Structure formats: C-alpha cells, structure tokens
Amino acid sequence: MAEPRGQLPEEMLVSIFQYLPLRDRAAAARVCRAWAAAATCSAVWQDTNISCDCEKEDMLPPHMSDCLDHVRNLRLEFEPSRKASRQTATELLMALAGRAPGLRGLRLECRGEKPLFDAGRDVLDAVHAVCRAARQLRHLDLRRLPFTLDDALVLQAARNCPELHSLFLDNGTLVGSVGPGSVLKLLEACPRLRALGLHLASLSRAALEVLAAPDRAPLVLLALRCACPEDARASPLPNEAWTELRRRHPGLAVELELEPALPEDSVTRVLQPAVPVAALRLNVSGDTVGPVRFAARHYATTLRALEVRAPASAELDEALEELAARCAGLTEVHCFCVVRPSVRDAFRAHCPRLRTYTLKLTREPHPWRPTLVA
C-alpha cells in the first residue's frame, strides 16, 4: 500500500473513522498503511454502531476481526425478517462473545416486523453467549428486541454480569415471561444497578425493598411497561413501598407506559400517589380522563413528559388543562387526538420549560409531527 501525500495526522483519521459504518472502515484499512493503522486503532472501535442491512460478505473481513477485542460499547441494528441481516447480527454477537471480554455496553435494535410465531431463539442464544463471556458488561438494552425474554436470560446476567449498571427488558412483546423471582436474584447479584426497565409483572414488593436497601447504588431510572395479560394480573405494589423507595432515592425518575391490555381497575392500582412519575404514556382502552387528573394532582412536581392516545372529548380537554396548570415542569406533551385551542394555550402559558408538543386543533394526515418551542 502506497502512502498518499499530505497525509492527515492519525488522531484526525481516528476521529473520522469512528463514525464510519463497518464496511467503510474495512475499505479505509485497505487504502494505505497509515489508514490501516488508524482504522484498526482501539479508539475507533470503543463505541461502535453496526447496521446489518448488508449482505454477509460485506461484514468484517478476517484481517480486521482482531478489532472486536477493542469494542467496549456496541449498538447493533438488524431486521429479524431478513435472513441475511439476522444471520449477520447473530454471527457478529457470537464472534463478540468469543473475542470481547471487555465489552461494557450492548444495545440491540430491530427494524421492521418480525416473522409470525418467531421466538428468536438464534438471537437470544447469541445474547446468552455475550452475557456468559462479558463479565464486565455494564449496560444491556433489549427494549427494541421483539422476542419474549425469559427468566433464563435474567439469571444468566445475574450469574455472569455483576457489574451491571443498567438493564432494560421492557420490550414490546405481548407475553411477559420474566418472573419477579429472577428479578429479585438479579438485584441481589448486581448491587450497582442504577437503571432498570421491566414489565410490571416482573416487579414485586420484595424487589422494591431490595432497591431501597441502604447499601445500594443510587437508583436513577425505573421504566415500567404495562402491556401483557400478566401485567394486568400482577399483584399491586403498595404506596408505602414506593414512599420508602422514593425516600431512599430522591433523584429517582419512573417512566410508566400503560397499554390497552391493562383494564381500568388495573390502571388505578398502578398509579400510586408516591410513585415519582417523570414520564407517563397513556394508551389505555378504558377511561383516560381519570388517569390524567390523577397525574395532575399527584405528579405535579415530577412529571416531565406526557403522551396520551385517546378519543377526543370535552372531559379530556378539561383534564389536560388542569394538568397544564399544575405540572409546570413539563418539557414535552403529546396528545394524539384533536384538542380545543384552550388546551394548547394552557400548556404554553403554564409550562415555561416546554420544548416540544403535539396538540392538534384540527384533524391532519398521519403521522402527526410535533411542534418545537423556540
């Protein structure tokens, strides 16, 4: 490989190459010796984003496979319905499990629809392999993985990933298979956990008590998704347990997502006054006005984001106006139904930190675009 004239310094090449997709990094490494050194530098690979939208032969060539040793944080995107994309993602995860014991963060994101009746066993087996090998793993985000997660995966993380700082299992599956017992074992094995995402049925009063223990790291985020039949049948979490958790972690923010599978009586059991709700997403099949009024009266000091999907009504407009008047800390509000002008005016007048909102006064073609506040 010849050396081109006017070569850029290696540190500048490194800062450029770290933003390149995988195949472009491989191409850059074939230009000259200086580019090859920069493209395989550990700094290029520490934070890596990979999109498996290419054919298998375009992935990491053998002469660059050693670069996987340098990966510390990986965001991997693939399409589960496309065989080539899925196979590439699975093989890359398996290779990573064998070569990257220093992996700190893994985030998986699926695009498109998954095939019907697809359990995703190949992908989940690869995630298991990563959890077995990456004992320094600190961040695992599976929110965009459309497969049913189970106790085996949680227990694998509990046994092999004691350094976990964040774990997100609140994905879009309609079946909840992670039991509260396995979550309890995870919390006991991972005392440094600071952010946790779960389906409601996976959380228990015992887990809240463990999280409130005096020797734990500060808990900053708890994301709860209520979308499965198991969530509707989950035992209620008493208000006093939330009170103790909030006292122990005053900076805790709770994100609640309530889906149509949750009946009206379950919604009232989930919305406890002491929960420090920072983000509330309401897409329930029953009454929406009651939860909005409840949020206005109990989450006024903590609520920062609200999303509502419900039929338009005068009662809902009144509830939204009450919420706007009480929740001055709101930074975003999105209502996916037509509202009257006074609702929009109320949020503009009472919420000085508002940065973006979706408050349409007339019907518009979807998708509805949010309005940015200057």
Image: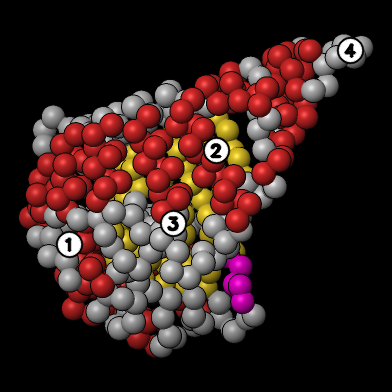
- x and y percent of residue 251 in the render? 27, 41
Q: Mark 4 points at which residue?
A: 2
User: What separation in Å lies between label 4 and label 1 (alpha carbons)?
Assistant: 69 Å
Query: Residue at point 69% right, 47% down?
Result: 54
Query: Residue at point 44% right, 86% down?
Result: 312
Q: Mark 3 points at which residue?
A: 120
The span picked out in magenta is 366-370
- Quadrant (top left/top right/bottom left/bottom right) for the C terminus: bottom right
Q: What residue type is labelled 3?
A: Gly
Q: Name the residue under label 2.
A: 92
Label 4 environment density (alpha carbons within 10 Å; few <14, some 14–19, many ≥20): few
Query: Residue at point 72% right, 36% down?
Result: 23
Q: What residue type is labelled 1?
A: Pro
- x and y percent of residue 279 in the render? 36, 58
User: What separation in Å lies between label 2 and label 1 (alpha carbons)?
Assistant: 45 Å
- Residue 368 is covered by the magenta coloring: yes
Q: In terms of sequence position, does the residue under pointer 2 or pointer 4 come before the other?
A: 4
Judge depth for marks 1 and 3 and give the one in front: 3
The overriding secondary structure of the stretch rendered in magenta is loop
Residue 197 or residue 330, whichever sits in front: 197
Q: In terms of sequence position, does the residue under pointer 2 or pointer 3 come before the other?
A: 2
- x and y percent of residue 311 in the render? 43, 85
What is the total number of numbered labels drawn onto the structure image? 4
Label 3 environment density (alpha carbons within 10 Å; few <14, some 14–19, many ≥20): some
